[in-house]
Amino acid sequence: MRRALLAALLGGATLFAPAVQARPPEAQMIIGRASVIDGDTVEIRGRRIRLHGIDAPEGRQTCTTAAGRTWLCGQRAANALADKVGQATVRCAVRDRDRYGRDIAVCSVGREDLNRWMATNGWAIAYRRYAQDYVADEERARRARRGIWAGRFEIPWDWRRTHRGR
């Protein structure tokens, strides 16, 4: 009886509901000059922003050219993003927040989606685990053998798993 009365007073809510992490509103924008951290992370006014739907090679990650030469593809991916951004104002539409507290966003310079640009130019792959938004762009880069697709590379999430703590 008491439980039914309490439930009625609370509108059917339970006292034992799990805590839910607040999601940032869809329309939240972060705007400003961006510092590139790596090929899929930027910082604007002290806020770390992970580019939604893509995964780029890590800064220390190497790849192999078709001729068998090793190169710093993670560093090159970050440089490509930095060159693309330059001193322009970057607009990031926040979609979520990750477990590290970074905002997850689609970022653009003017009308150009930077996440898509990274995938289309072969500097990042589609992060299918979280989104399908950039799969077609990745496929175009792979077929054209752009960026990391010009040779061999380890998938960034696999590279992170095998190089943790090194």
Image (spheres, rainbow, N blue to C red):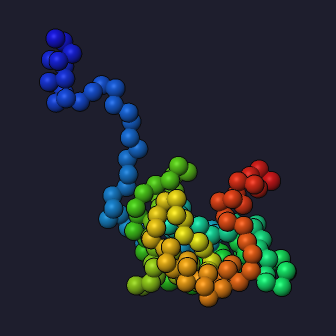
The residue positioned farthest toward the bottom in the image shown = 144
In the image, 115 versus 134, the foreground residue is 134
In the image, 93 versus 88, the foreground residue is 93
Looking at the image, which residue is at 37% across and 55% down? Answer: 24
Q: Position of residue 93 (x, y in %)?
A: 39, 68
Looking at the image, which residue is at 52% across and 59% down? Answer: 129
Looking at the image, which residue is at 49% across and 59% down? Answer: 130
The residue positioned farthest toward the top in the image shown = 1
Looking at the image, which residue is at 69% across and 78% down? Answer: 148
Whether residue 118 is visible = yes
The residue positioned farthest toward the front in the image shown = 143
Whether residue 79 is visible = no
Considering only vertical position in the picture, is 6 above or below 82? Answer: above
Determine the image quadrant of residue 91. bottom left
Determine the image quadrant of residue 11. top left
Q: Position of residue 99 (x, y in %)?
A: 53, 49
Considering only vertical position in the picture, is 133 above or below 8? Answer: below
Q: Where is residue 70 in the image (x, y as percent from the top left)?
A: 83, 77
Q: In this view, does 125 lie to the left or right of 155?
A: left
Determine the image quadrant of residue 152. bottom right
Q: Position of residue 126 (x, y in %)?
A: 54, 70
Considering only vertical position in the picture, is 2 above or below 44? Answer: above
